[in-house]
Image: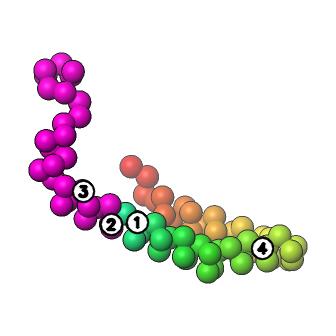
Amino acid sequence: MLATGRPFFSWSWVQQNWGQIVADLDQHIELTLIAVGIWSRHLGPLGRRRVALPEWRSPVTTATSVLYVIRRWPCS
């Protein structure tokens, strides 16, 4: 029980919102599969090339670092 006297988890809320839960879960799975597909198609081979060819290390590391910073910028 929370301080409000209501339980932390409510099965009735789950039943009332089941359609939205399923829709959100479906979207989550779709976006996860897209991300895994992008990684396996592009970043996986790029990483293997980076390890196999020393001359690729610096450019690949720089490019992926820039992408990482852009994704997180501006910080909140």
Amino acid at the residue labelled 1: Ile
**Mark 4 or mark 2, which has the lower sequence index?**
2
Amino acid at the residue labelled 3: Ile
Name the disc covering residue 48, or none: 4
**Residue 9: where, in percent of width, then height?**
23, 34
Judging from the image, what secondary structure is the residue with disc 3 in? helix
Residue 17: in magenta span: yes
**Mark 3 or mark 2, which has the lower sequence index?**
3
**Mark 4 or mark 3, which has the lower sequence index?**
3
Disc 3 to disc 1, how far (Cα)? 12 Å
**Mark 3 or mark 1, which has the lower sequence index?**
3
Q: Is residue 2 left or right of residue 54?
A: left
Report the span colored magenta: 1-27
Name which residue lies at 69% across and 69% down.
62
Mark 1 and mark 2 in contact (Cβ < 8 Å)? yes
Judging from the image, what secondary structure is the residue with disc 4 in? helix
Mark 2 and mark 3 in contact (Cβ < 8 Å)? no
Mark 3 and mark 4 in contact (Cβ < 8 Å)? no
Residue 14: in magenta span: yes
